């Protein structure tokens, strides 16, 4: 009884992620859902098997319970600590979202600058690529020194980590414009801004969206690592506490919630992608499974 | 170098120019592309005058610089030497008083047929209602009715080119420049497009310059056929078969004037292929 309740969150292809896979219009939603079901039963089965293995290992006590708690124990902890966990989940989610949105805005703006200004490209792009080598997680302690224990250092870290895939994908997308389209625009006497708005930017969206999908999962990592280093709130903080107390069920419950944040945000970006570029998604064929 | 320009060209152009001002005037145009290692001469001393209402086809082997010539007229590329005048004004940058049809249709893949055509209006800031009426008229004229909302990838190559043609005609340009617009189409679709193109030219009175390497296309469509040599591109000869403006496809192809011009053109292109 408890087990079924739990299997859901960790299953990306569970019924929860299905609704966005049926955009309104296009081939009938019913047939699409059916196709999705046909495609998703395999990964679902594997997940179920893994879950059964977990349950079996815990039940036979093949591994001590303080290392691998039973699914039931995890569920009980989650239920018992729910208000506390929810509060911390909310904190981490907020840090992630703010960090992701900032990274997206700054990243796209930087990409536009890099694509339109040769000087900016020559002087900044190599540095941006080089900066990627710096292990950003190692910056976290410095950020705590600079910004204290509040949300700021976590958001900054999330931005720093999520920024890179956004810039790279946006630059690639903006550059991939067909030169003939730009010539065509020139024969129409279009201004630079109109050319950007109507040709360049929409054309860059497919690549930008895949960058954003990578970025959103990385933003979660940034927020959690920020919380590891110095925080009194958030799932990262709870994880450290649980680890200090050797509270395995809480550790697992916490981990499940972190993954859930990633999955939900990822699906949200997918939905956004389908709203923004339906023309692209319709060409890709097999919808959600191509990426999830 | 001027000797390579056929005397017929200069003569007929100047004779006609006596009573009508040319709408496009290219004089002694040379275009060189320089890279680190080498210098290629794409166009060498090309002179050409196009009169209002003419349909000039420029025929030549691949890589003879005919597309470059068209882009220079449109101001998309600049000449190394020489003068280009459009409507009597010197061309120094991209020209907007023209319609341009590209080799590949250059459609926006996220826009449906009608919206792709209306891009022209949006970019130019044309009156929306008038542009929409005009777009619907062109959609009907080119047989795209029923496909207004279809995305480019849902269309055949021929239909994509029709959309591009509608877009190039939306703002009723007096000059339409076409860069091998039907090159990627199968033979049958190409014929149909040629027939439509002849009709559109007659119905709109637009001055057309069309670049092609197809012999029948050049002769069927052109009121004047400009033949170019391989690189460096020069004008070898100008043909004026004197066919009537209205041309039924089948009968035209067997018309002695057509066959003679086609044979001559094939000779010129064939001869220019042979090593010197």
Image (tube, rainbow, N blue to C red):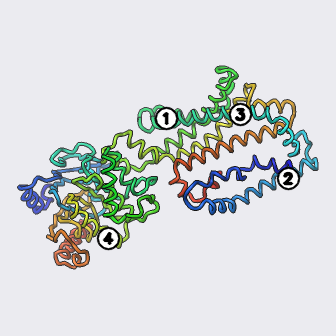
Q: Which residue is mark 3?
A: A90
Q: Which residue is the site of mark 4?
A: B192
Residue highlighted by disc 2? A53
Residues tagged 3 and 1 counted as in contact (Cβ below 8 A): no
Cα separation between marks 4 and 1:
47 Å
Q: Identify the residue position indicated by label 1 in the image.
A: A109
Element on which disc 4 rests? helix
Q: Residues within 10 Å of mark 2 (few under 14, many from 20)?
A: few
On the same chain, marks 2 and 3? The answer is: yes
Query: Hey, which quadrant is residue B17 in on the image?
Result: bottom left
Residue B125 in sight here: yes
State the SS at label 1.
helix
Q: Position of residue A111 (x, y in %)?
A: 49, 37
Marked residue chain, label 2 = A
Q: Please say whether residue A239 is visible from this viewpoint.
A: no
Label 4 marks which chain's residue? B
Disc 1 vs disc 2: Cβ atoms closer than 8 Å? no
- Which of A132 and A113 lies nearest the eye of the viewer? A113
Residue B223 place in picture, x, y as percent: 18, 65
Q: Could you tell me which secondary element the residue under label 2 belongs to?
A: helix
């Amino acid at each position: 009884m408890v087990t079924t309740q739990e299997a859901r969150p960790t299953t990306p292809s569970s019924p929860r992620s299905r609704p966005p896979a049926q955009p309104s219009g296009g081939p009938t939603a019913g047939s699409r859902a059916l196709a999705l079901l046909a495609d998703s039963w395999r990964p679902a089965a594997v997940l179920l098997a893994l879950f059964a293995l977990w349950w079996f290992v815990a039940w036979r006590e093949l591994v001590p319970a303080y290392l691998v708690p039973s699914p039931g124990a995890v569920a009980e902890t989650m239920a018992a600590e729910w208000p506390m966990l929810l509060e911390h989940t909310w904190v981490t989610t907020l840090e992630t979202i703010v960090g992701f949105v900032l990274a997206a805005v700054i990243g796209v703006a930087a990409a536009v600058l890099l694509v339109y200004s040769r000087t900016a490209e020559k002087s900044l792009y190599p540095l941006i690529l080089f900066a990627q080598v710096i292990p950003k997680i190692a910056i976290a302690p410095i950020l705590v020194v600079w910004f204290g224990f509040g949300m700021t250092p976590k958001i900054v870290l999330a931005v720093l980590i999520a920024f890179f895939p956004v810039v790279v994908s946006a630059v690639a997308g903006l550059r991939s414009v067909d030169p003939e389209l730009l010539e065509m625009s020139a024969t129409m006497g279009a201004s630079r801004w109109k050319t950007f708005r109507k040709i360049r930017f929409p054309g860059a969206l497919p690549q930008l969206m895949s960058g954003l999908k990578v970025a959103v999962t990385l933003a979660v990592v940034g927020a959690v690592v920020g919380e590891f280093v110095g925080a009194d709130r958030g799932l990262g903080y709870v994880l450290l506490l649980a680890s200090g107390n050797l509270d395995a069920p809480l550790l697992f419950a916490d981990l499940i919630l972190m993954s859930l944040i990633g999955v939900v945000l990822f699906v949200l970006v997918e939905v956004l992608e389908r709203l923004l570029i339906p023309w692209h998604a319709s060409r890709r064929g097999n919808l959600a499974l191509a990426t999830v | 170098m001027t000797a390579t320009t056929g005397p017929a060209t200069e003569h007929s152009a100047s004779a006609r120019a006596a009573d009508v001002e040319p709408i496009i005037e290219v004089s002694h145009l040379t275009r060189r592309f320089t890279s680190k290692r080498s210098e290629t001469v794409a166009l060498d001393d090309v002179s050409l005058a196009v009169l209002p209402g003419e349909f000039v086809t420029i025929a030549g082997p691949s890589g003879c610089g005919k597309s470059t010539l068209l882009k220079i007229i449109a101001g998309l590329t600049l000449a190394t030497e020489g003068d280009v005048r459009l409507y009597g004004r010197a061309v120094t940058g991209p020209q907007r008083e023209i319609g341009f049809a590209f080799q590949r249709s250059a459609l926006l893949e996220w826009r449906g047929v009608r919206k792709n055509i209306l891009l022209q209006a949006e970019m130019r800031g044309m009156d929306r209602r008038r542009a929409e009426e005009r777009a619907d008229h062109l959609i009907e004229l080119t047989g795209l009715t029923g496909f207004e909302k279809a995305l480019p990838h849902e269309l055949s190559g021929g239909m994509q080119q029709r959309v591009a043609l509608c877009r190039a005609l939306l703002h009723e340009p007096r000059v339409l420049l076409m860069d091998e617009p039907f090159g990627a189409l199968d033979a049958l679709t190409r014929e149909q497009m040629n027939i439509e193109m002849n009709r559109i030219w007659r119905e709109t009175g637009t001055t057309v310059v069309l670049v092609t390497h197809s012999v029948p296309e050049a002769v069927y469509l052109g009121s004047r056929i400009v033949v170019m040599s391989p690189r460096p591109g020069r004008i070898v000869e100008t043909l004026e078969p004197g066919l009537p403006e209205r041309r039924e496809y089948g009968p035209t192809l067997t018309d002695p004037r057509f066959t003679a011009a086609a044979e001559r053109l094939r000779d010129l292109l064939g001869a220019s292929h042979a090593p010197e």
